[in-house]
Amino acid sequence: MSLTNAAEEVRFPVGVFLIDPAVTDEKRRRWIAEMAQAPANLRVALTGLSDDQLDTHYREGGWTLRQVVHHLADAHINGFVRFKLALTEDNPPIKTYEETLWADTIDGREAPVELSLKLLEALHERWIILLDSLRESDFAKSFSHPQRGVMTIDKAIQLYAWHGVHHTAHITGLRERKGW
């Protein structure tokens, strides 16, 4: 394996995000289940880590594990709002945010991870209640993302399901590499 491939495997431990255009109810239910399970999986991945370990970068040039956890909360708060906008407006344009700068704020660098874990647990409980209430036609509702273009609820479910698994794998991958 080349250095580039090894570095990419660390950066994208579950692969890069790709939209599955062939959405079925079974796939949708699986992605929603992954979203529902994401906070618990994250909590398990973090179990027993010390503050020094949480302040370790998962890869060269990457965030610390603490920043990864807070980034998940930041990103999923934004995601939940985007879903609500899509469901209540006609393809609204959404604003992006500078995730790297958000991760570098004091709360992103230093706050206890428990704060974001509790936030994610509550947020995902609400998110799943919302998703479980949707009619088939609701999954076609969309928001307009400046870089990704039109994102339907179906596409966005895939993104946020992948996102939770992706970042949890950053943590478990570092634990494996370090023998923690």
Image: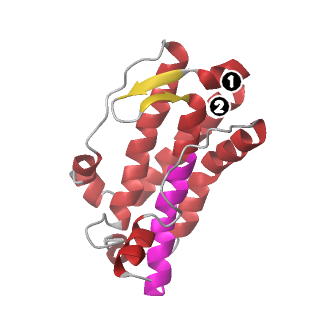
The one nearer the camera, 2 or 125, is 2
Query: Mark 1 to mark 2: distance in Å?
Result: 5 Å
The one nearer the camera, 52 or 85, is 85
Residue 50 visible to an observer of this rendering: no
To which residue does mark 1 refer?
134
Seen in the picture, residue 13 relative to 130 is either above or below; the reply is below
Query: Magenta segment range?
Result: 161-180
Label 2 element class: helix
Label 1 element class: loop
The disc placed on residue 61 is none
Question: In x, y percent, where is residue 44?
Answer: 58, 66
Q: Do labels 1 and 2 touch, CB within 8 Å?
A: yes
Where's the N terminus, which quadrant? bottom left
Residue 85 visible to an observer of this rendering: yes
Q: Main secondary structure of the magenta part?
A: helix
Question: In x, y percent, where is residue 117?
Answer: 48, 53
The one nearer the camera, 61 or 77, is 61
Question: In x, y percent, where is residue 121?
Answer: 55, 47
To which residue does mark 2 refer?
131
Q: Give the farthest residue toward the bottom.
A: 179
Three-letter code, disc 2: Leu
Q: Residue at x 48, y 74 (%)?
A: 173
Q: Residue at x 57, y 20 (%)?
A: 141
Three-letter code, disc 1: Leu
